[in-house]
Image (cartoon, helix red, strand yellow):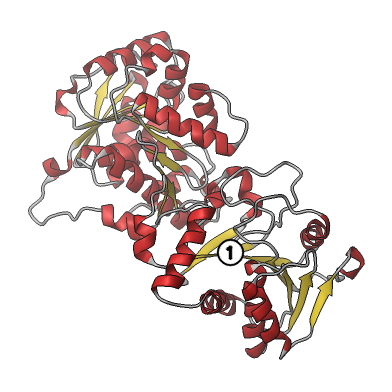
Amino acid sequence: MNILNASQIRNLDAHTIQNEPISSLDLMERASRAFVRWLCARFDNRRPLVFFCGKGNNGGDGLAIARILSAKGYGVTVYVVDYTEKSSDDFSKNLQRLQEHLTVHYIKEEKDLPKLTGEEILIDALLGSGLTRPAEGLLAATIETMNESPARVISVDIASGLYMDKVNGDDDAIVRPDYTVSFQLPKLAFMIPQNGPFAGDWLVVDIGLNETYIEKTKTPYFFTDKRSARKLIRDREKFSHKGTFGHALLLAGSFGKMGAAQLCGGACLRSGVGLLTLHVAGCGYEIIQIALPEAMCSVDIHEKMLTTLPDLNAYSAIGVGPGLGKEPQTLQMLENLIGEAKVPMVWDADALNLLSENPDLLKKLPEHTIITPHPKEFERLAGKSKDDYARLELARSFAGEHKLIVVLKGAHTSVIFPDGTVHFNATGNAGMATGGAGDVLTGILTSLLAQKYSPQDAARLGVYQHGIAGDRAAKARTKTAMIASDIVENMGW
């Protein structure tokens, strides 16, 4: 799924109107009915709906939604914020339609703002995706009123006051919705961590915009959803054998951190690899043999840390980093690994920390190596950023400069290719913010590389499957109670 900017969305609307053909008013009606279908499936008509509408097309959407819901028996009250003399044509037409059925209230100054009890559902249709400057004056006061109310808030297309594809100011007035119902495509703003409070639980409803135009529109931003992830999955043929699915090597664990190796290895096995060998410190031998009987175990000469490499010729992919530690002997092993490895690799955790402390080593990483930093690890690798948009741009630049695939972990984990394209992920939840979850991801990615998935496909599919396993785990255990091993136990596709 493509993620387009505000200008591209406007062009998409215009193309659909011209080529379907359909009038802009009828397209607004179609979008409004899609919103209504979503709302009616989740909320009955026992709670009053209070609409706050601006005077542009987002407000026009709100007026159309209010009219349709009123006809369905919902209790509807509509307020139009009269912050400007101008209004869009489609707003005006929908206002005329609505006034044939309902009284519309106007907010001309702050004293006109309603007193809310908290029992209502508030519909935010003040400002849409075309916002170019911060909400001020009466609009800002209305947004503040909505945010101060304990009532549930639903934003139409995008939260009012939130820029679609650029950073907001710290003091900008922005609606904090419980839900955002976005039309046709997700917005880049939804993927940015600092915008979390301004997106809520968001979803996309199809309003029939031209799919061909969407696919042909150039963008560096994409969204890996269920449909696109399924296209990446390869069938397992009837006459396959364990050799068909590769032999992975994991370099993981050290004294006191063997759980990381176990989690990584378990995830690798659950992801379909044919054979798995873990190279571990001497202290980990019995742990791995007992915890992962399906895996083979190669033992380092050192009792507490990894210092040497096994013969690498047998392996089709290598994962390194979970629980590794940062001892000088381990650093030397990593230097040797870069010189000797001839197969795709995944680098994570302490392997990345050692890279950040030894930038000359970073420059030697083979092209298309997958690295999986969390935000702090990425900061140590690439430097600080002033905001999350700047960090995303830094990650794009970093991936291109070093020709690496950067998996920047977090909500909507971004998979960034050397060509600068960014693939945000649809799955995952806050329950995965727990120790060991990243080790699980490394195992998944290494398994897919061993099975001869390209690094790009392995990264996108692995991140998606990691997240969906986490979603299953959260459903079974709750987000609070789940732990990393629950992710492993809920894998499968």
Hey, what amino acid is under mark 1? Asp
Q: Is residue 218 left or right of residue 268?
A: right
| Residue 200 point in image, percent of width and height | 62, 57
Residue at 31 percent of width and 29 percent of height: 369
Residue at 24 percent of width and 46 percent of height: 272
| Residue 209 point in image, percent of width and height | 43, 68
| Quadrant in which the C terminus is drawn | bottom left
Q: Is residue 52 above or below residue 1?
A: below
| Residue 400 point in image, percent of width and height | 38, 29
Considering every residue shown, the one lying at the far right of the view is: 111
Can residue 299 be seen from the camera position used here?
yes
Q: How many marks?
A: 1
Q: Mark 1 points at which residue?
A: 157
| Residue 366 point in image, percent of width and height | 28, 23
Residue at 71 percent of width and 90 percent of height: 100
Can residue 252 be seen from the camera position used here?
no
Q: In this view, does 112 lie above or below 219?
A: below
